[in-house]
Amino acid sequence: MHRLMRFPEYQKTRLMMRYRDIEYSLVQGLGRHLWKWSASVADVVISGQAITKSEAIKEAERAIDRALAPKKLRLVPPGSSD
């Protein structure tokens, strides 16, 4: 589910979107083929960039999925030197 919020006229290319209840921003860069995204998950900022808007959305949502995924822990038996 995506929810778009537009900013004032001077910021036409900045979009706020929501994915899995995490809000993230999508901004068109100065060049025509540059889109930047950023999100904050558990007080950690994640960001990236892509060539197209749709690619930036996909990358942002994958990063949010990874950030929300349960962490895999390696179990070490008691008394082990690891």
Image: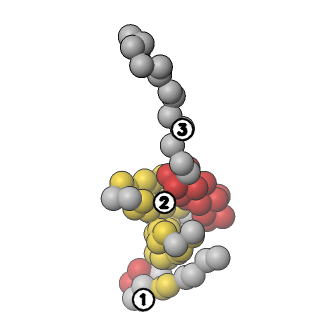
Q: Check the image and report above or below for 1 versus 69.
A: below
Which residue corresponds to the image point at 36% horizontal and 54% vertical from the top-left? 44
Which residue corresponds to the image point at 47% horizontal and 71% vertical from the top-left? 23
**Residue matched to label 1:** 9
Q: Percent x, y for residue 30?
A: 45, 63
**Residue matched to label 3:** 72
Q: Percent x, y for residue 59?
A: 59, 55
Which residue corresponds to the image point at 57% horizontal and 81% vertical from the top-left? 3
- On-image quarter of the C terminus: top left
Q: Tag 3, which secondary structure?
A: loop
Q: Check the image and report above or below for 36 versus 21.
A: above
Report how far apart the C-alphas of labels 2 and 1 lie in the structure: 19 Å
Residue farthest toward the left in the current orientation of the protein: 43
Q: Tag 2, which secondary structure?
A: strand
Q: Which amino acid type corresponds to the residue marked 2 in the rendered image?
A: Lys
The crowd level at tag 3 (other Cα within 10 Å; few <14, some 14-19, many 20+) is few
The crowd level at tag 1 (other Cα within 10 Å; few <14, some 14-19, many 20+) is few
Q: Check the image and report above or below for 10 versus 45.
A: below
Q: Tag 1, which secondary structure?
A: helix
Q: Percent x, y for residue 51?
A: 60, 55
Q: Percent x, y for residue 71?
A: 51, 43
Sequence-first tag of 2 and 3: 2
- Dot label at residue 39: none
Q: Are marks 1 and 3 in contact (CB under 8 Å)?
A: no
Foreground: disc 2 or disc 3: 3
> Is 39 left or right of 65, judged from the image as shown?
left
**Residue matched to label 2:** 36
Q: How is the image coloured?
A: secondary structure
Q: Are marks 2 and 1 in contact (CB under 8 Å)?
A: no
The crowd level at tag 2 (other Cα within 10 Å; few <14, some 14-19, many 20+) is many
Which residue corresponds to the image point at 61% horizontal and 77% vertical from the top-left? 2
Q: Which amino acid type corresponds to the residue marked 3 in the rendered image?
A: Lys
